[in-house]
Amino acid sequence: MINEDIRAREVRLVGPAGEQIGIKPFREALQMAYDANLDLVNVAPQAKPPVCRIMDYGKFRYEQQKKEKEARKNQKIVDVKEVWFRANIEEHDFNTKLRNVLKFLRDGDKVKCSVRFRGREITHADIGKKVLERVLNEATELCIVERAPKLEGRSMIMILAPKANS
C-alpha cells in the first residue's frame, strides 16, 4: 500500500536513505514524503506500528520487475523427454534410441524410458526390465535414477535425471 491507501494512525518511518526517523503520526509521515517529492510505502504492514518507507515507488517497481526478468532469463527449464522401447527390440534400434537418451541427458533434460508390452509379452516383464537396466548401464556416467523400473499397466517405466555436473 502506498500514500493514502495506508490505514494506520501512526507509523514507524524510515527515510529515503534508509535511516530510522522514528514513530510519527500518519499525516505527518505522508507530508514528509510529499515534501521530498516521494511516496510513502508500507513495507511491513503486519508490524505494530506498521513500518513505512519514504521512496520513489515507480523506480522501486521498475527495478523489481527488472530483477524478476533477469531471474527468469537465468532459469533452466528441465523438460522430460520420453523414449519408447519394445521388449524384443533389435540391436540397431536399441542403439539408435540409446543415442537419443544420451543426447537428451547431455542437453540437461530428464528422460522417461518406457518399455511397451503388447499381447502376451506382459507375462515376460523381466525381459523389459533387462532392456531398461541395459539403458541404465550404458548411461550410468551421465545420469542418476530418479525412478527405478516399475510396471504400470502395460508399460514399464524408468525416469533418469542428468547429473548436476554434466
Image (cartoon, grey):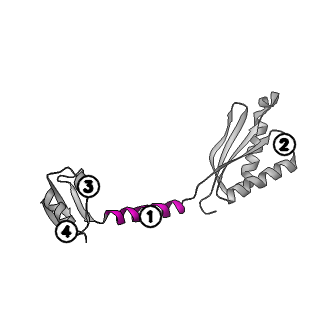
In the picture, residue 107 is in which quadrant?
A: bottom right
Q: Nearer the viewer, mark 2 or mark 3?
A: 3
Residue 74 sits inside the magenta stretch? yes
Q: In the image, what residue type sits under mark 1?
A: Lys
For mark 1, does the 10 Å Cα neighbourhood hold few (<14), some (14 to 19), or many (20 or more) residues? few
The residue tagged 1 is 67
Residue under pointer 2 = 89
Distance of label 4 from label 1 (alpha carbons): 29 Å
In the image, which is nearer the foreground, mark 4 or mark 1? 4
Type of amino acid at the residue the image marks with label 3 = Ala
Nearer mark to the viewer, of 2 and 1 = 1
Question: Identity of the amino acid at label 4?
Answer: Asp
Asked which quadrant contains residue 166, the reply is bottom right
User: Exactly how many numbered labels are in the figure?
Assistant: 4
Q: Which mark is residue 44?
A: 3
Secondary element type, mark 1: helix
Q: CA distance from mark 2 to mark 4?
A: 78 Å
> Which numbered disc flags the more N-terminal residue, 3 or 4?
4
Q: Which residue is mark 4?
A: 35
SS at mark 4 in the image? helix
The residues colored magenta run: 57-75
